[in-house]
Amino acid sequence: MIYHYPGALRPVVIPMYREVPVFIIRNNMKTIGMTVEEYRKIFGEI
């Protein structure tokens, strides 16, 4: 899936895997400028 985020350096690509590897999540967070704290606020502690 390809998403466009306002102000992002490039589109955010999320593969359709059963489980998405952590490095892909972190790379996408870096692309949109999201911090770990913001991620945890949205998704909670895993």
Image (cartoon, rainbow, N blue to C red):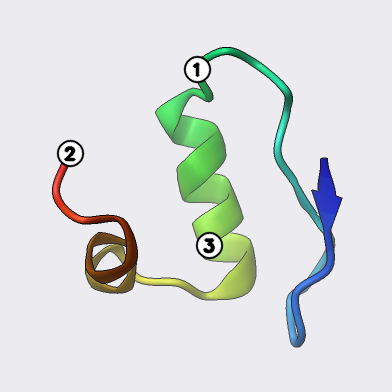
Number of numbered markers: 3
CA distance separating discs 2 and 3: 19 Å
CA distance separating discs 3 and 1: 19 Å
Whether label 3 touches label 1, CB < 8 Å? no
Residue 13: image location, x then y, percent: 77, 44
Mark before the other along the chain sequence, 2 or 1:
1
Question: For the C terminus, which image quadrant?
Answer: top left
Element class at badge 2: loop
Residue 36 sits in which quadrant?
Answer: bottom left
* Residue 24, above or below 6: above
Left or right position of 9 against 17: right
* Residue 16, above or below 7: above
Mark before the other along the chain sequence, 2 or 3:
3
Q: Residue at x 53, y 24 (%)?
A: 20
Left or right position of 22 against 15: left
Q: Residue at x 63, y 64 (%)?
A: 31
Residue 3 sits in which quadrant?
Answer: bottom right
Element class at badge 3: helix
Left or right position of 7 against 22: right
Q: Residue at x 60, y 53 (%)?
A: 28
CA distance separating discs 2 and 1: 14 Å
Whether label 2 touches label 3, CB < 8 Å? no
Indicate the amino acid at tag 2.
Ile
Mark 3 lies on residue = 30
Q: Residue at x 22, y 70 (%)?
A: 37
Mark 1 lies on residue = 19
Element class at badge 1: loop
Q: Residues within 10 Å of mark 1 (few under 14, many from 20)?
A: few
Q: Nearer the viewer, residue 45 or 36?
A: 45
Mark 2 lies on residue = 46
Residue 6 is tagged as none
Residue 6: image location, x then y, percent: 76, 85
